Image (cartoon, grey):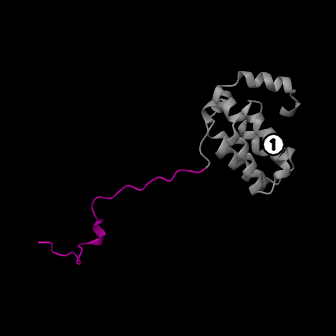
Amino acid sequence: MPSNYTKDQFWQLYKKLPQELKEIISCEETSDNLYEVCKRYELLDFLYGITEITGQVLLGVLNPKNFQLTIEKVLNLSPNVAKKISQEVSRFIFYPARVALGKIYDMEFSPTVKEKKSLPIQKTPPKHLGEDSYREDLS
C-alpha cells in the first residue's frame, strides 16, 4: 500500500522526479484545484486524504489508473462520488502532467472529455434535393 512509505522515502522519490512534476506538486494552482473539487462535492473533510493520494500519484507511487478505486476504498466514498472526483482530478492535475506521468508509469493519457469530430463540409448540394426553385436571378 502506498501509504506505508515514510516521509524520508517520499522525499527521496520527490528528489528524483522530473522538474515538471515537482512544479505541479508545489504549485498553488494544484492546491486550489483540489480544494475546489472537494468543495464542489461537499467533501472538504476529505481534502487531506484526496491531496495525499493525489500526491502519491504525482510521486510515482500510485498508478493513476488506480486513483479512483483508491480514494473509494481508503476514504470510504461511494463509487459514483469517487468517479466524479477522479475525473476532475485527472482533468485538472493528471492530464496537464500527462507527459511526465506517462514516462513514470509508461502509459498514455487521454483527455476525459472526448473531442467532437467535425462533419465533412459538403461542397455540392445533395442530389435528392433537386433544383432550388427559390433562387433569385442576380443579373
In the foreground, 128 or 104: 104
Q: Residue at x 15, y 72 (%)?
A: 138
In the foreground, 1 or 15: 15
The part of the image, by quadrant, that contains residue 56 is: top right
In the picture, which quadrant includes the N terminus?
A: top right
User: Number of labelled discs?
Assistant: 1
Q: In the rendered image of this protein, does residue 23 appear above or below residue 131?
A: above
Residue at which label 1 appears? 70
In the image, is 67 to the left or to the right of 135? right
Q: In the rendered image of this protein, does residue 81 appear above or below residue 48?
A: below
Please, what is the three-letter code of the amino acid marked with disc 1? Answer: Thr
Q: Residue at x 21, y 75 (%)?
A: 135
In the image, is 44 to the left or to the right of 20? right
In the image, is 78 to the left or to the right of 109? right
Magenta region includes residue 76? no
Magenta region includes residue 130? yes
Furthest residue to the bottom?
134
Q: In the rendered image of this protein, does residue 66 appear above or below residue 19?
A: below
In the foreground, 108 or 96: 96
Circle 1: element type: helix
Give the x, y percent position of residue 5.
86, 28
Give the x, y percent position of residue 77.
84, 52
Q: Residues within 10 Å of mark 1 (few under 14, many from 20)?
A: many
Q: Residue at x 67, y 40 (%)?
A: 94
In the foreground, 69 or 12: 12
Give the x, y percent position of residue 116.
50, 53
The main secondary structure of the magenta stretch is loop
Give the x, y percent position of residue 25.
72, 34
Q: Which residues are magenta?
A: 113-139
In the picture, which quadrant includes the C terminus?
A: bottom left
